[in-house]
Amino acid sequence: MARARIGTSGWAYGNWRGLFYPPKLRRGEWLVWYARFLDTVEVNASFYRLPSEELVRRWVAHGPDDFLFAVKAWRAITHDRRLADCADLLEQVYARAEPFGAKLGPILFQLPPRFPADPPRLADLLALLRRDRRHAFEFRDPSWHSGEVYRLLERHDCAFVPFDLAGLTGPRVATASFVYVRLHGHERRYRGRYTREQLEDWAGWLAERLEEGRDVFVYFDNTDEEAHAVVNARELRAMLARWTVPVAAELEETGGGAGCGARSSA
């Protein structure tokens, strides 16, 4: 049966302390706490700098057996070389992701907003991808939102990422055996809370994908000071409860809040 996993983009936000994380909880235990309530997280730090093997193994040790880490691909691939001649960089990404083992989720490629569509260049990169890994692509430039690109991704079982970024959107298109969605904030970038109506709209589309047998990954990136990313993740997870495993414990039962804080490179 297909499964929905809902999480946030990063977890090591200082302002989460006292809102989501208990005030006296050590920073090194934050991921352990996070994993009690959500079953996946998107690693943002890997976009800026590839994490060490030691750091990855420490993260893995803090997550339960069925926890998954989605890993954001190194910006050297998407922003510096813009997908061209990336075989060496891609091998480095795979090597650093190897210690995640069975807890490795999709690898996300986030392309810059002023990078116009270049299907041949995308095709060259897709040909280098490992078949035993899941890959997702978020195209910020709308010129990539085309049938030609969708067909390329579909041919390689790579997910086109529908996203919401304060007026900039990625269409709700499913091109792979799984779905990957990013919600960055509806009215303001990385801020604000999605309403119940907005979440129900997403839940309806996601439920249809689950019924098709596609696993679903959704990450909330509205990581502001008002707990919105965690709150929305848990709300959407509840809406899709038919396809998800129960959370290990409820925040209310553990005495914690449901907040988050300022953006960080976690």
Image: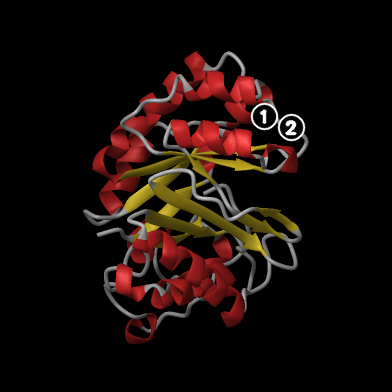
Residue depicted at x 56% and y 73%: 201
Residue depicted at x 26% and y 72%: 248
Looking at the rendered image, the quarter that the N terminus falls into is bottom left
Residue depicted at x 53% and y 73%: 232
| Residue 132 appearing in the image | yes
Distance in Å between CA atoms under marks 1 and 2:
8 Å
Considering only order in the chain, which callout, 2 or 1, is on the residue closer to the N terminus?
1
| Residue 20 appearing in the image | no
Measured as percent of width and height from the top left, residue 158 is found at 46, 37
- Residue 208, placed above or below residue 156: below
Q: Quadrant of residue 263?
A: bottom right
Question: Contact, CB < 8 Å: mark 1 with mark 2?
Answer: yes
Residue depicted at x 36% and y 53%: 214
Helix, strand or loop at label 1? It is helix
Q: Quadrant of residue 239?
A: bottom left
49 relative to 247 in the view: left or right: right
Name the one closer to the observer, 60 or 242.
Answer: 242
Q: Which residue lies under the disc numbered 1?
A: 79
Amino acid type at circle 2 is Phe
